[in-house]
Image (cartoon, rainbow, N blue to C red):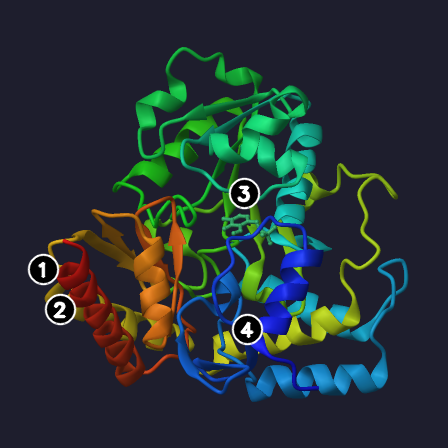
């Protein structure tokens, strides 16, 4: 099965649609917070498949759950009842915000958003949506209508749903300004913007959105695809600001690496869908559900949220001590293990150098290094990653400026 990096690169570059910013390594194996490439080189994984591997790689709870489910059955369409789905739903609803007890199961974050969008439009019988500057909700056409960045939208501008008004994230006045709010079905918001560069909401902002929504019969849809599932030290990031959404979207780590998206809402919202009106062949498949239950069991039983709080705080502290002082660092910010180092220069060379030195991270925009480590990371691993980043920045300062 051994195939060299050069062969892998040649075939992927030739046959895979060229839509990804490729990095110069081919990953073969992962365990815990580390991954190894085809040449056996080791990396600390702060990319985690864009925030998917929340329990690291090869976590025994997930591996065992998937193995067991593989032996039973992999697919049972959601038109059939199934034990694995039932156990997942029971666990899921025990951790969702108060009253959000109805779930639509799909296969990705964007699909979770699509369901939220359709439910909100149908439940309110209104056509307009408020979304945020800098927002990222995915790239399917419905989700793209709620995603801010021009670079993703411009080729499709003519066919994108036109009912969405973007307002500045963090600015409450902008939400009400110049609008007939009774025309709006929903406000979509990421409690902490992920792709937008790890932007935290100002104090009182989410509460303010909740109040505007309540006053005007608008649904508050909170997108927890990136910030949810313990990433910030609480099960859902919006809990830090003490609000309850009407609809919430979940994705990334929920399926333990098996594709899964979840939309949860109050039953009267979800119940507007008629039979057959919104379905997915793979949504709610037993394999993803078994993995999803294992993920939620780990998050509720293994002291993981506490680890995120402890190591997250430690990491922000050491990043501020060791990295913040660099001439090319503008800011270090984050919550829990959702962390950004904003640079004064473009990220790409730095990202590639960090990879060469054994640290895999991701990015936002043009100048932000984004880190979404596994939630099980130890203080020592966080320290090692920070020291690699320090070394990377030193290299850049010495050789480039
Ligand atoms: C907040 C948020 N919503 C939605 C999505 C879309 O998820 P997916 O890429 O699984 O479609 C993402 C992906 O990064 C996200 O960060």
Tag 1 or tag 3, which sits nearer the N-term? Answer: 3
Q: Residue at x 66, y 35 (%)?
A: 141
Q: State whether residue 40 is above or below residue 155.
A: below
Tag 1 or tag 4, which sits nearer the N-term? Answer: 4
Q: Out of 292 and 208, give the one closest to the viewer.
A: 292
Element type at mark 3:
loop
Contact (CB < 8 A) between labels 2 and 1?
yes
Regarding residue 148, the answer to whether it shows in the image is no
Q: State whether residue 240 is above or below residue 34.
A: above
Q: Is residue 303 left or right of residue 89?
A: left
Instruction: Give the alpha-carbon distance from disc 2 to disc 1, as whole Å.
Output: 7 Å
Q: Which mark is residue 325?
A: 1
Q: Nearer the viewer, mark 3 or mark 4?
A: 4
Regarding residue 47, the answer to whether it shows in the image is yes
Asked if disc 3 is less than 8 Å from ligand 1, the answer is yes
Element type at mark 4:
loop
Crowd band around label 3 with a 10 angstrom C-alpha radius: few (<14), some (14–19), many (20+): many
Instruction: Give the alpha-carbon distance from disc 4 to disc 1, as whole Å.
Output: 33 Å
Residue that carries the numbered disc 2 in the rendered image: 322
Residue that carries the numbered disc 4 in the rendered image: 26
Tag 2 or tag 4, which sits nearer the N-term? Answer: 4
Q: State whether residue 109 is above or below residue 2.
A: above
Crowd band around label 2 with a 10 angstrom C-alpha radius: few (<14), some (14–19), many (20+): some
Residue that carries the numbered disc 3 in the rendered image: 137
Q: Is residue 83 left or right of residue 159?
A: right
Q: Nearer the viewer, mark 3 or mark 2?
A: 2
Contact (CB < 8 A) between labels 4 and 2?
no
Q: Out of 24 and 71, give the one closest to the viewer.
A: 24
Tag 2 or tag 3, which sits nearer the N-term? Answer: 3
């Amino acid at each position: 099965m051994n195939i060299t990096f050069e062969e892998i690169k040649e075939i992927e570059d030739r046959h895979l649609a060229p839509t990804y910013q490729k990095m110069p390594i081919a990953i073969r194996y992962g365990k815990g917070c580390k991954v190894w490439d085809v040449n056996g080189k080791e990396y600390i994984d702060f990319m985690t498949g864009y925030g998917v591997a929340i329990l690291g790689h090869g976590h025994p709870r997930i591996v065992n759950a998937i193995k067991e489910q593989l032996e039973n059955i992999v697919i049972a369409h959601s038109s059939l009842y199934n034990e694995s789905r039932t156990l997942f739903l029971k666990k899921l609803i025990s951790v969702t915000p108060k009253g959000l007890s109805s779930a639509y199961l799909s296969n990705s974050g964007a699909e979770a958003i699509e369901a939220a969008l359709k439910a909100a439009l149908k439940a309110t019988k209104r056509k307009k949506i408020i979304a945020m500057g800098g927002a990222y909700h995915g790239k399917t056409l419905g989700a793209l209508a709620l995603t801010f960045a021009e670079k993703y939208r411009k080729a499709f501008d003519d066919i994108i749903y036109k009912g969405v008004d973007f307002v500045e994230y963090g600015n409450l006045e902008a939400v009400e300004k110049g609008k007939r709010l009774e025309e709006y079905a929903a406000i979509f918001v990421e409690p902490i913007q992920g792709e937008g560069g790890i932007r935290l909401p100002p104090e009182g902002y989410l509460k303010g959105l909740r109040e505007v929504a309540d006053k005007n019969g608008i649904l508050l849809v909170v997108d927890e695809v990136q910030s949810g599932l313990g990433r910030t030290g609480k099960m859902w990031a919006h809990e830090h600001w003490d609000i309850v959404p009407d609809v919430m979207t979940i994705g990334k780590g929920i399926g333990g690496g098996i594709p899964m998206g979840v939309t949860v809402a109050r039953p009267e919202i979800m119940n507007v869908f008629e039979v057959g009106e919104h379905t997915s062949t793979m949504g709610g498949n037993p394999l993803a559900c078994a993995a999803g239950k294992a993920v939620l069991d780990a998050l509720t039983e293994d002291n993981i949220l506490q680890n995120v709080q402890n190591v997250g705080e430690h990491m922000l502290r050491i990043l501020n001590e060791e990295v913040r002082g660099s001439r090319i660092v503008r800011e270090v910010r984050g919550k829990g293990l959702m962390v950004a180092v904003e640079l004064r220069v473009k990220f790409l060379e730095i990202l590639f150098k960090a990879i060469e030195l054994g640290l895999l991270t991701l990015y936002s925009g043009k100048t932000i290094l984004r880190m979404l480590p596994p939630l099980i990371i130890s203080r020592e691993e966080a320290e090692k990653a920070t020291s690699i980043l320090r070394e990377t920045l030193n290299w850049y300062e010495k050789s480039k400026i």
